[in-house]
Amino acid sequence: MFTGIIEQQGSIEEIAKKKNLWTLVVKPRKVWRDIKLGESVAISGVCLTVTKKDKGSLQFDLMKETLAATTLGKAKSGQLVNLERALKAGDRLGGHFITGHVDAVAIIKNKVTRSNYVEFQIQVKNSLRRYFVEKGSVAVDGVSLTIGKVAGTVFSIYLIPYTLQETTLGLKKSGDLVNIETDILAKYVLR
């Protein structure tokens, strides 16, 4: 379980592609000295398991389903990713509950930039539209955000300068793909 409060960014150092499995090596900007093998880390919103750690880098295995269902299937060496360790019992919950199980890849239809203002208009597949409500929660590339407007299959999020600087969302532009995880509470209420 995660909160969507990104701890840091990291860079993809290496991708080893095998049949039905990729091994991803990520170097966090700041080394997590106490991280353990088997620990869960959200990589741009995708829950992955640490399979190896070495000289400040972390290794993860990506199965065929993860490659097909998330933006990590298009990952490239040198690419920056958002990093968040799993929530510990007793920690503050600053965002919202996120599982790291991506519902879909969506496209940024439009990026509106003004002085101290950035709005992303994100289009999702029709089957997900029922999970989006104004003032509801969504995780975009693992970042916990509040939904602004909703119009059919397009919803808007508004990003403060801190979020743009501290996450990979500051690098995104119109046409880019992002991982979307809908609010787990909305899923259970609708079910």
Image: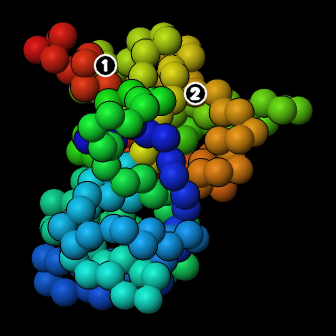
Expressed as whole percent of the image width and height from the top left, the position of residue 182 reads: 32, 29
Indicate the secondary structure of the residue bearing disc 1. helix
The residue indicated by pointer 2 is 157
- State how far apart marks 1 and 2 are (Cα): 15 Å
Expressed as whole percent of the image width and height from the top left, the position of residue 187 reads: 20, 20
For mark 2, does the 10 Å Cα neighbourhood hold few (<14), some (14 to 19), or many (20 or more) residues?
A: many
- Which of the labelled discs sits on residue 71, or is there none? none
Query: What colour-coding does the image apply?
Result: rainbow
The residue indicated by pointer 1 is 131
In the visual, does 76 lie left or right of 35?
Answer: right
Q: Residue at x 66, y 55 (%)?
A: 171
The mark that comes first in sequence, 1 or 2, is: 1
Q: Residue at x 51, y 52 (%)?
A: 7
Q: Residue at x 66, y 33 (%)?
A: 159
Quadrant housing residue 131: top left
Quadrant housing residue 132: top left
Q: Is residue 103 visible?
A: no
Q: Is residue 55 visible?
A: yes
Q: Residue at x 42, y 73 (%)?
A: 33
Q: Amino acid at mark 1?
A: Tyr
In the visual, does 60 lie left or right of 111?
Answer: left
